[in-house]
Amino acid sequence: HGNDARGLVGLSIGGNGGVYTDNQFTVINVGSDTSGTGATGGTIALTADAASRIATHGAHSHAVHLYSAGGVAGTADGGFAFINTADLAGGAGGSGGTVDVKGAVVTQTYGDYALGGLYQSIAGGGGDVSTQSDSSGLFVLGGSGGQGGKGGAVKLGANLTAATEGGAAPGVQAQSIGGGGGNGGNANGVVAV
């Protein structure tokens, strides 16, 4: 009956990618240096029979909140080399997992801003190339930000029933949101590309 409560919550959140740091001082640095990739969020599945009913009474108290999120990619930090042509890049963000609702799910909310069901698949953002530790040297290539992950499928069955009585309280809100790309890094050198 309280505010900011949830009748039922299901979460799956992928881990964040690791940070890549190059603290070395070298003459020539080539190859590919990429931070860790965010993990994919897992599948969230809810199956209910005809006797199932989930209700809340407080404000901002959603009856059901199912959320699968991809992890955020790590940051890539460049180092110094006289010739620094390493492909420094942020890792890719993890994709959101599938959210799947089946059966006769019945929800009821009575408070303001209380959704009958909030179903979300949200991807993680791509990794940045750190602006505090850009690649540097005499001949340098800049770094590229990582690709954002993809939002997953949100599937709602035909037998879903949602009733609300409060203000600004949609019965169902379903979202699949892709992650933003990472920021590229600077190249500090006599010749910088």
Image: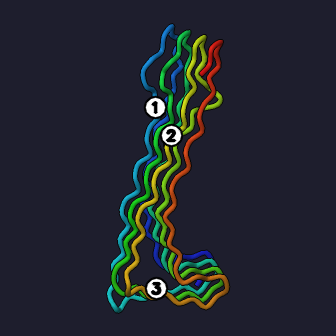
Q: Do the residues labelled 3 and 1 touch (CB within 8 Å)?
A: no
Of circles 3 and 1, the one toward us is 1
Numbered circle sitting on residue 34: 1
User: Quadrant of the rendered structure where residue 31 is?
Assistant: top left
Q: Are marks 1 and 2 in contact (CB under 8 Å)?
A: yes
Badge 2 or badge 3: first in the primary sequence:
3
Q: Residue 95 carries which label?
A: none
The amino acid type, in three-letter code, at marker 1 is Thr
Instruction: Say which residue label 3 marks.
Output: 54
- The picture places residue 186, in percent across and down from the top left corner, at 63, 27
Q: Residue at x 43, y 41 (%)?
A: 37
**Which residue position holds label 2?**
146
Residue 42, how many percent across, how many down?
A: 37, 59
Q: Earlier in the sequence, mark 3 or mark 1?
A: 1
* Mark 2 neighbour class, 10 Å CA radius: few under 14, some 14 to 19, many 20 or more: many
Tell which tag, 2 or 3, sits nearer the viewer: 2
